[in-house]
Image: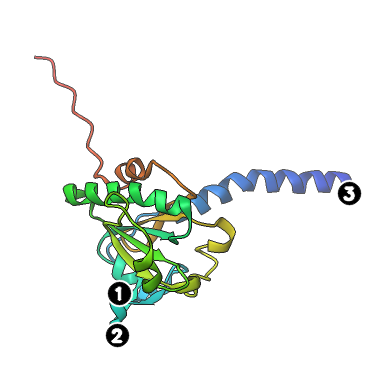
Amino acid sequence: MKPPLSRLAALFCAAVLLAMPLAALAEESTAAAPASEQAISREAIARSPFSFELPSRHGNEDKVEFADLVLDTNAVIFLWTTDCPLCKLEVRHMNRLAAWVKEHPEANLCVYSVNFDSLGERGFEKAKWDEVMLPQFSVFYDPGARHFKEEAWKVEENGLPLTFFFARGGFPVRIIKGFSADLLTVAQKEFLPKKAPAKPESAE
């Protein structure tokens, strides 16, 4: 005798529910998995869904690629425009992070940004800055976000500012949507070497 359809449906739903936590765990561990020495190469990074290529600063002929930023170091990539008030406010905290990076080489971290102003570098230079807000980190330009249409970045969906924290090799470990004053805290947690727990003193 075949089991009734209601029983089959119940068994199917139970199997799906049992599988969901395992699938979610696999997806989460894949996103934050550390890169092995063998896995890190320019070719592998070029196949990343985050891969991009931009003209370098000041109109030079050289190109800037995603692999240039993440091949040897951890990286923060900040996406923004100068006509976005929250973006300009975030620059202050990004400057704090950039200053901290210089004092903590053990984090092996670099701070970059891509500015989407429609006029590119000319628009950026016309923006009004004060000494505190003037970016103290590398700025690349992609007018209109033409090179950031890939699904991985989700620029149109998430809006700006948008900040990505990548482990060396281009593995995303944290994505911050919108303004955050906790960039430094995130960098410290993600990129400072973990200290080994102190060994208990042996009783004499």
* Towards the viewer: 173 or 154: 154
| Label 3 vs label 2, nearer the camera | 2
Specify whether 174 is left or right of 130. right
Judged from this view, the residue extending furthest toward the left is: 204
Q: Secondary structure at mark 1?
A: helix
Res. 154 in view: no
Specify whether 200 is left or right of 191. left
Res. 150 in view: yes
Label for residue 57? 1
Classify 10 Å Cα crowding around label 3: few (below 14), some (14-19), many (20 and above).
few
Dots 3 and 1: beta carbons under 8 Å?
no
Specify whether 115 is left or right of 134. right
Give the x, y percent position of residue 126.
Answer: 37, 67
Amino acid type, callout 2: Glu
Q: Which residue lies under the disc numbered 3?
A: 5
99 w.r.t. 74: above or below: above
Give the x, y percent position of residue 65.
Answer: 34, 74
Give the x, y percent position of residue 185.
Answer: 34, 40
23 w.r.t. 153: above or below: above
Q: Which residue lies under the disc numbered 2?
A: 61
Point out the image quarter for the C terminus.
top left
Specify whether 1 is left or right of 73. right
Q: Quadrant of residue 50?
A: bottom left
Q: Find the distance from the CA under tag 3 to the CA under tag 1.
A: 65 Å
Amino acid type, callout 1: Arg
84 w.r.t. 46: above or below: above
